[in-house]
Amino acid sequence: MNTIDRIERAVRETSHYLKRNLGTHAGKRGQTNPSDEVQTGADVWSDDLFFDALAPLDGVGNYTSEEREATVDCGDGYAIAIDPLDGSGNLASNNSVGTIVGVYESELPANGRDLVAAMMVLHGPYTTMTVARADSDVVQEYLLRDGHSERRGVFELPEDYTVVGLAGKPIDRSEAVNELAKELERDLKLRYGGATVADLAQVLEYGGLFGYPESNVYPEGKLRVHFEAAPLAYLVEAAGGASSDGGKSLLDVEPDGLHARTPTFLGNRELIDRVEAVLGSD
Ligand code: F6P
């Protein structure tokens, strides 16, 4: 078993436990995270769970989380970047949340070309884990249940695309984004749930576009490069799709700090081309 196998297993086992006990922590309030977002008790609790499972592994050099200010050094090896509970704002209304893990071969800050694996867990009506690895040609989905994981299927973005989800209020977004949203929402079904993992799962399944553009509220976009944008871009690109910050692949974004943000677009190549045609010259 190599280090990525061990990381994969630890994420899987922790996710089983997390899903079973999430309800207990859903309503409790924590402090704010380094991006100034109010933490739920579940954000802090899940971060501790993943830290305890991943930091001691052989071959893991350090652990950086969306919920912690600084990187924790834990030996020699890969750098883990994690969003332990993506979309935790969805807990109050009992909607889906996720977990995102990036495994980088260099210390952070790093760009997405240094990723060697990315994983996302969707804690939905049932729990699935999707894994892309440098040493595998396929993006594998697993079903996690009763403490076991079963291979469920392999993701390849469908050629035909049917869904779109662009975050933000029209009043806060640029004219260009609003124009693009209007065009896309004419032809595609609107799917936006407020948890990136859950929204991206729709794109992987049905084809389409998920985006969190820049806005007056989030001038650099809302999603974090290390914890969300780059690992998910790695997954989508490995599944035959594309990613962009509006001008280039999210894997080429150079984060200037651990918690750097970026406008984020993920989906079918044709739709990403349309995003870049509109925003590239913005
Ligand atoms: O981590 C940020 C996040 O929770 C994402 O998972 C999600 O896509 C986004 O925020 C939701 O933001 P908003 O509430 O602004 O739509």
Image: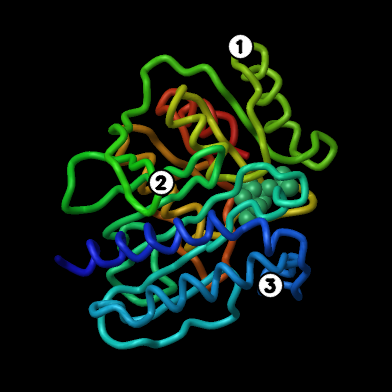
Residue 227 in percent (x, y) is at 50, 61
Q: Position of residue 141 (x, y in %)?
A: 33, 40
Q: Quadrant of the N terminus?
A: bottom left
Callouts 3 and 1 close, C-beta under 8 Å:
no
| Residue 222 visible to the viewer | no
Q: Nearer the viewer, mark 2 or mark 3?
A: 2
Q: Quadrant of residue 39?
A: bottom right
Q: Earlier in the sequence, mark 3 or mark 1?
A: 3
Instruction: Give x and y (percent) for residue 6.
Output: 25, 67
Quadrant location of the C terminus in the rendered image: top right
Question: Which residue is located at x 46 percent, y 85 percent?
Answer: 72
Within 10 angstroms of label 3, few (less than 14), some, or many (20 or more) residues?
some
Where does label 3 land, which residue?
A: 33
Furthest residue in direction front, as rendered? 146
Tell me where residue 173 sits by quadrant. Answer: top right
Mark 3 residue's CB less than 8 Å from ligand 1: no
The residue at which mark 2 appears reads as 145
> Alpha-carbon distance for marks 2 and 1?
37 Å
**Residue drawn where x is 62% and y is 19% of the image:** 184
**Disc 3 from disc 1: Cα separation:** 38 Å
Crowding at dot 1, Cα within 10 Å, few <14 / some 14-19 / many 20+, comes out as few
Q: Earlier in the sequence, mark 2 or mark 3?
A: 3
